[in-house]
Amino acid sequence: MFDQSQIDTLRDAPVPPGRLLIDGAWREARDGATIDRLTPIDGSVLTTLADADAADVEDAVAAARAAFADRRWAGQAPAARKKVLLRWAELIEANALELAVLGVRDNGTEIAMAAKAEVGSAANTIRWYAEAIDKIYGEIAPTDDGALGLIHREPVGVIGAIVPWNFPLMIGTWKLAPALAAGNSVVLKPAETASLSLLRICELALEAGLPAGVLNVVTGRGAVSGQALSMSMDVDALVFTGSGATGRRLLEASPKSNLKRVYLELGGKSPNIVFDDVGDIAEAAKVSAAGIFRNSGQVCVAGSRLLVQRGVADEFVAALSEAAAKMRVGDPLDLTTQAGAINSQAQLDQVLGFVDDAVDQGARVALGGQRILEETGGYYMAPTVVTDVAPDHRLFRDEVFGPVLAVTTFEDEAEAIHLANATDYGLAAGVWTSNLGRAHRMIRAVQAGVVHVNTYGGPDITVPLGGVKQSGNGHDKSLHAFDKYVDLKTAWIKL
Ligand code: ADP
């Protein structure tokens, strides 16, 4: 980890314009268009980004296709690809301070979190998949003596990866690392408000020896370059993390173009369920507060609905509110900050709108509820706890993606299960209980891709992350992530 004085030396460093990476070269959009990149720290212009259009995206896809077709990457021995990827991870670590500060100035995440969850996690993810690739074998089928059935694993081809702004390096490498490790070529589309650290790690990938054209990046507006990528006739699979609305568009683009496969990770409205047999209330409340308010709630697995059993509700909500009120919200470049900025003015407005609607629908703001530090010019919001939230409230059902916790009480286990599953989402959940049988019953009953028990957050790269219901399909992380980036091919040989 680095110290505050090191961070401060880079706080105002000039940021070069973000450009497109196509076939190993950095360039402007063909028409020279750019967009301004405002930092959420104080709303000032940080730099500009190339605003790619459909022609630029076609160039990137063509470069990726050419790189895949001549096997300049897929044709290398797994051990050779591993070496390049391990060097990439090392370079990311060697540039950790610069990457963390750049990323934070771009997207507003508090730096203590970004150092670990962004830069540290990116290097770790790349290393994990690099180390896996020369240990995965093909299969021989259990045929009779007259035949030999071989099952080969082959890279899919050109992968389009569209990623969000909350954890660009973490989520970006969850997709890039297994895709590249498996031998695919990639066209990456970062979010408009979190491209800079991804661009920098792609530069480091070239330095590590990734051949030109294997990894390409198109920046700019999602509705233009992201849309063009989704409609490309030469992208084999699209992997996405972001909103449900965009996810639907990507699914629709598939039959309108080349029937590309589409894998979506679409966020959640995750229940954090506290029973009256919870062990240490103060500890559970502290962890639950972090589980919603870190990165100002801009976390797809955030425990954004607290379902609490009536007997402990008042005590638990008080303890959680106390922990939340103590959280230091503010300058994301201060190492002691526990919740940084909201990513953009538009996002802040949307989050505040959710609180207004909840109050209109009869809920009660028990903590926070307002914008803070407006004098900085940045986008900050107080950790907010809203009680008396009912299942028909928008705050109960829709993803806020901000520091707003919706609290609902329940009577018994059956009601807890009913409430937990009463949204369209199914990404994550938490269960707090000292009853082992109840914990396992809840794991089975709650519709979610991950159920935390007596904790919230923390699953590492060894386990998959993916949703059920409208939280999406397909999994990031773990060896299961390879399923999206590998095709099975059968060879049937008569003996
Ligand atoms: P959020 O609302 O959280 O910003 P989005 O789904 O809009 O989520 O953004 C996630 C990613 O999707 C970003 O990289 C964004 O640029 C991209 N994106 C936005 N709109 C589209 C679209 N119509 N087609 C493809 N990608 C898009």
Image (cartoon, rainbow, N blue to C red):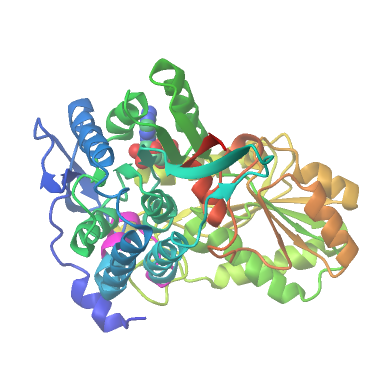
Q: Main secondary structure of the magenta part?
A: helix
Q: What x and y, as percent, mark residue 327?
A: 52, 70
Residue 453 percent across, percent down from the top left: 74, 64
Which residue: 61% across, 35% down? 470
How many numbered discs? 0
Which region is colored magenta?
Answer: 102-113
Q: Is residue 458 left or right of residue 47?
A: right
User: Which corner quadrant of the figure contains ligand 1?
Assistant: top left
Pick the front one: 147 or 85: 147
Picture quarter with the C terminus: top right
Q: Position of residue 402 (x, y in %)?
A: 51, 50
Horizontal relation, residue 153 to residue 212: left or right: right
Q: Is residue 211 magenta?
A: no
Quarter of the figure that contains the N terminus: bottom left
Q: Position of residue 165 (x, y in %)?
A: 38, 49
On whether residue 109 falls in the magenta region, the answer is yes
